[in-house]
Image (cartoon, helix red, strand yellow):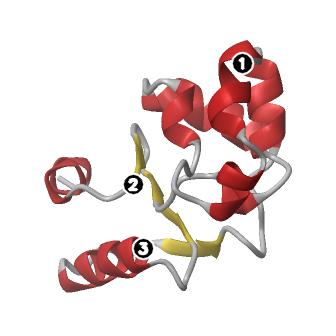
């Protein structure tokens, strides 16, 4: 199981604490130090079943400074994935990758189901 996070993010800290309390073993990866690749993002996006917009950190400074709220609708999926692969701070986190699921963000109920 892979846990991709930004160590300074409070939601990531909450999710990590939850995983630790449940005794779940995972590989931790700092999204700022090791940005997801285009290939990884494509794979996770397909596996997640989520709309691509859910992979964007819409509350992040970079997202806002790039005015992506207005630009994303005009971009193709490929362009959006390429953009996400340029900077980990654009990507919503944490991301939990299990054998059969990809969870974006932290919702206790989803995590509970994913680690069963």
Report helix, strand or loop for mark 3: helix
**Circle 2 — which element?**
loop
Q: Is 43 situated above or below 51?
A: below
User: Which residue lies at the image location 26% right of the left edge and 49% below the top edge?
Assistant: 114
The Cα atoms of the two marked residues, 3 and 2, are separated by 8 Å
Mark 3 touches mark 2? (CB < 8 Å): no
Q: Which mark is residue 77?
A: 1
x, y (%) of residue 87? 80, 57
Which residue appears at 32% of the width and 72% of the height? 15
Q: Which mark is residue 12?
A: 3
Spatial distance from mark 2 to mark 1, Cα to Cα?
20 Å
Asked if the residues shown at circle 3 and circle 1 are in contact, with their CB atoms under 8 angstroms apart, the answer is no
Q: CA distance from mark 3 to mark 1?
A: 26 Å
- Residue at the spot of label 2: 105
Q: Is 73 in front, or is 54?
A: 73
Nearer-N-terminus badge (3/2): 3
Q: Is residue 96 above or below residue 31?
A: above
First along the sequence among labels 2 and 1? 1
In the picture provided, is 57 more to the left or to the right than 38? left
């Amino acid at each position: 199981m892979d846990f991709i996070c930004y160590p300074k993010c409070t939601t990531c800290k909450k999710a990590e604490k939850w995983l630790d309390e449940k005794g779940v073993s995972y590989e931790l990866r700092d999204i700022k130090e090791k940005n997801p690749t285009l290939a990884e993002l494509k794979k996770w996006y397909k596996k997640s079943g989520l709309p691509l917009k859910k992979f964007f950190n819409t509350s992040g400074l970079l997202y806002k400074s790039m005015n992506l709220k207005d630009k994303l609708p005009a971009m193709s999926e490929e362009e959006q994935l390429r953009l996400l692969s340029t900077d980990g701070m654009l990507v919503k986190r944490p991301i939990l990758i299990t054998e059969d699921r990809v969870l974006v963000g932290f919702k206790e109920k989803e995590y509970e189901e994913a680690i069963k």
